[in-house]
Image: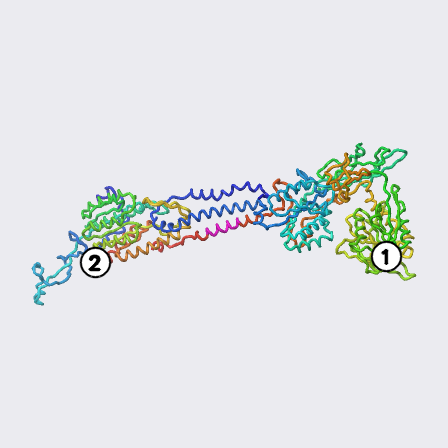
Amino acid sequence: MSETTSKGAELLDRAVLARVGNLPLCARRAMIGSVSGRHRSPHRGSSVEFAEYRSYVPGDDLRRLDWRAYGRSDRFYVKEFEADTNLRLVLVVDASGSMKYAGEQGRGTRTKLDVARSLSAVLAQIALRQSDAAGLWVADDADRRNRIPPRRKPSHLRAILAELASLEPEGSTSLVETLHLAAEQEQRRALFVVISDLFAPPEELKGAFQHLAYRNHDVAVFHLLDRDELEFRFDRPTRFVDPEGGATIVADPSTVARKYLAALKRYRDALDEVVRTADLDHHEVLLDADLGQVVADFLTGRAGSGARS
Amino acid sequence: MNFLQPWVLWGLPLIAIPVVIHLMHKRRHRVVEWGAMMFLLDGAKLSRGRQRLREILLLAMRTLAVLGLLLGVGRPIAGGWVGRVGGEAVDTIIVVVDRSASMAEHVQGAPESKLAAGMRALRGALEVTSAPELVMIDAVRPGRAQRFTSAADLSVLGMDEATAAASDMPAAFETAVTYLQESAAGRSEIWVVSDGQSSDWAPADGRWQGLAAAMNDLPAGVRVRLTLDQTERAENLGVRVTRVRRVVEDGAAELVLDAVVNRASAAEGSRDTAMRVDLAIEVGGARSVAELEMVGSEARLQGHRIPVDSVDEEGFGVVELVADGRPSDDRFWFVFGDDPTLETLVVSEDEDVERIARIASELPFDPTLRLTSRGIEPTEFDGATGLAGTSLVIWQAALPEEGGEVAALLEGFIGTGGVILFLPPGAADGAGPRYRGVRWGTWNEVVVGDEGASPETWRADDDLLATGVDGTPIPVGEVELYRWCEIDVDGSAYTHQTLASLPGAERLLVRAGTPSGGAYFLGTWPTPGAGNLAAQGIVLVAMIQRAVDLASLSQRSASWRDAGAVELGADWRPTEEAGRGALSALDVSSGVVSNGDQWLALNRPDSEDEAALHPIASLTELFGDVDVVTAEVARSSVKDDGGLLEEIWRVFMVLALIGVLAEALLCVTEGDAPPVNDDPEEAAA
C-alpha cells in the first residue's frame, strides 16, 4: 500500500493486521450510508433481501406493486426489500495527559496513547479496506479539538494516520465534551469507537454515551487500563503527579492503597452500569495485552452479534 | 533534675534521627505521572489530613521513644514535684550523717573524702527537695536530732568535717525513730550518708530488731535511703600506740613506747612483700624517726626509747606515718606521765571471796603498773564515787536490775572501758534479775567424797584463758569444782561467748558482748569450798590479771582516750601544738586537749581501724520489711546525687514504651497492605 510510506504508516501494526486477516468490521445497528455496502440499512431498497409487504398507497411506485399478490388476494401490496449500505466508522481517540501513562509504575515503553493509535490505525485500515468510511475525532484539550470527517476513499487512511501520528498526550481530558459534540455533528448513523482510559466521572460518561445512543450511533469503547492502575502495587512512598495539571499527592501506598482500590471498584461498578444502560460494546484493554487478539476479539464479537447473524 | 549518668545526654542529638530519616524518606520519593488521580484523590481526600496528622504523630512517637530511652538510660533523678510525680511525697527527711573517722578516707584517685562525696550528694539532693521538715542527726553524737532548713545549714553545723570518733548508727536510728514517733510526722524518709563500716553499724546489735519493728509501726511509713561509699583503698597504713610509759633510770628520763603499724591491702599477695615504714615520733617539740621493717600486715615498735626532759613528768606527743589516703589513722596522740594506779573494786557479800579476789588482783604482773584493790559490801556500793579510778570490778552479789540505777552505773563503767567480773550470789536460785542477757541459775554441788567437776572445753586462743604469749597454756583442766552455779543465757538481745564449760556443756565462764570494756560471768567462787581455784591459783590469777590488763587499757586515760567516748567540760581547750577543730567538736576530734590541770589525748577508737565494711545487702536486712533504697556513691561524676533522690528513669522508660507502642499501633492501623490479586485476568476483570 502506498499509505505505508507516508507519515504515521508505522502505526499500522502488521502483526495485528495479519492476525485479524479478513475479519469484517460489522455494525451492530443498521447504518445509513450514501453508497451500498455490506451493512444493514434502515432504508428499504432493491436488494435481494425481502423485508415485508405493505399496502399500496397512492404515490407509490407502481413498479413495486406485487402483481402476484394482487392476483391471489385482490389487494394491492407493495413488496419491500432491505437495503445494504456502507458503514461510517468514527474513531474517537482520547489524547489527554493521562494517556501518556506507560505502565510498569511509570517506566513502561508503550503508552496508552500508543495503544490507542495502533487500535485506531488498524480499525481505520479495516474499515477503508471494506469500502466503509472512516473518520477521526481527537479528544484532547478542548481548544485543540480536532476532527477528520469519515470518507471512503482509501487514500483517506493517510490523513487519519498522519493525524494519529501527530497526537501528543497532554492537557486535561475533554472526552465527554467531544462525545457530545460528535453526537451532535455526526448526523448520520455511525459506528463510534471510543479509545480512552475513561478517567472521567461515570455520570458524565453516561450522559455522553446516552447522547450517542440517542442519535442511533453504535458505540464501542476500548477502555485502556494498566495493571498498576488495577492493582496499585507500589511498594514505597511515591509522588503522584497528575499529568493533566491537577493535584500532586505524596502518598505512602501502604496507607492509601485500600482506599484507592475501593474507589476504583466503585468507579468500575458505575461504569458497568453505564455500559448496560448505554448498550456499549465495552472492551477493557490492558497496556500489555496482545492487540491482535484484542482487535480480533472485537471484530469477531461484532460479527457474531451483527445484523446479518 | 540531674542524671546519674549524664554522659548519656551527649546522645541527645540522636532524637533527630527519626526526623532525619523522615526527611530522607520524603526526599527519595519516586515521581510518577499518574492518570488515575481521581481514585487516588478519592482515597486520599479522606485520609490526607489524617495522613498528615499520622505522620506528625509517628514522628513525635519515634522521637519520644528515642528521647525516653536516652533520658532513661541517663538515670534521671529528681526531687520536688518531679520526684513526687515519679516517686512519693515526703513530709519529713531525717538526715543521718556518719562522720566517723573512716569517712575521712580519700579513695585512691578521688579528689574528696568519702564524707565530702556523700555530703555533696546529700546537698544536691536537698537542693531539689521540698520536704517541709528537715532534721539532722550526727551519728557520732547520736542522741540529738536537730532541725535545719536548707542544705547550706549542714556546713554551718559542721557536718562536712569527719571526726576521729566512731559512729553509733543504731543509736542514731533510735533517735530518728523517736523523733518521728514524737512528732507524729507524715510520710518520712531517713537519708543516710555512710560507708557502712561494720563497727559503726554493729549489725549484731540487738537494737536493730526493735528499730525495724518500730519503723514498721510508724503510721505514715518511713523509707530509708542509704547512700554508701564502700570503695576500699587498695593500700593503707595505720598507726596506733599500744603503750607508752615514762621511766627514769639513773636520773635520765625516757619514754618507752610501743606502737603497731597495720597494713591493709586489697591486692592479693601484696602483704607478703616487705616494706620500710618510717614512723615519726614527736614529743615535746622534738621529732625523731623510727624505721620499721614490715612483712605481712603488721609491724611492731617495741620498747622504743625516746629521751625526754627529766624535769617534765608529764607531756604529750604524737606518732605519725606519711600521710596516705586515710588520714584518720596516720597519727596517734598520746599523753604520758606517772603510770596510773589500777584499782580493783571487789563488791562481795562473802569475806573469803573478797579476800582471795583482792590478793589475786594485786599480784604484780607488770612492774610498770601499780595495782591496788579495795573491797566493799554490795550495800555499800555507791556508783558515783565508788567507781572513780576503778579499772576492774569483781561483783559477787545479785545481778543489778536492768534499767535500774546500779545497772546504769555499771553500764557507764563498761562504756568507759571498765571490766566487770560477775560471780554468783550465795543465794542464787534461778529467779534473779537478768543483766546483759545473763541470769544466775541454781547452785550445783558434787556429793562429798566424789570428784569435782573440771572444765571440759575452754577458749585457749583468746580472752581470759588464752595461752600466754610465750606459749605456756593456762592449766584450766586442772581446776576442780565442787560447787558451781548455772549460767542462764538469753541470746535474743545480746551476744555471748562461752569461754569455758563443764561437762554437759554447762557454762562456767561467759563473756557478754559489750561495745567496750568487758562483762564476764564466772559460775563459781574462788573459795576452797567451791573448788581449787584459789589453791591451784594459776587459773584464777591469770583470769583476774588479764581482766585488769584489759581494764588498764581504759585506765590509759593518762595516755589517750577514744574520741567521742568522753564528755569534755567547758574548760577543756585544745593545746596549741596538738589541738585542732572547733571547740564544739573537741570531744570527737583527735588531738590533745587540756583543762589546765591535765592533758587528755583523744584518738580514733580501735573499731575505726577495722576495715570491714558491711555489705549493702546485709545492711538492708537490718531494716526488716522497711522500704530501703540503696545507692553506692559513684565517684566518676561530680554531678552524681547518689541514691537520695527519686530515680525517675522508669517514667522515661514508660514514655519510651508508650512511644514505641503508639508508633506500632499507628503503623498497624493505617498500614494495611493492599489486597493482592495474583490473577491478572481477575484483576483486569
Q: How many marks?
A: 2
Q: Residue at x 33, y 54 (%)?
A: A267
Residue sitting farthest toward the front: B570
Residue count near mark 2 (Cα–Cα under 10 Å), binned few <14, some 14–19, many ≥20: some
Q: Which residue is mark 2?
A: A307
Which secondary structure lies at badge 1? loop
Q: Is residue B424 left or right of residue A142?
A: right
Comparing B98 with B94, the one in front is B94
Q: Is residue B295 visible?
A: no
Where residue B438 sits, quadrant-wise, is bottom right
Q: Which residue is mark 1?
A: B425
- Which residues are drawn in magenta? B655-667
* Chain for disc number 2: A
Nearer to us: label 1 or label 2? 1
Question: Residue flagged by tag 1: what amino acid is it?
Answer: Pro
**Decide: marks 1, 2 in contact (CB < 8 A)?**
no
Comparing A159 with A273, the one in front is A273
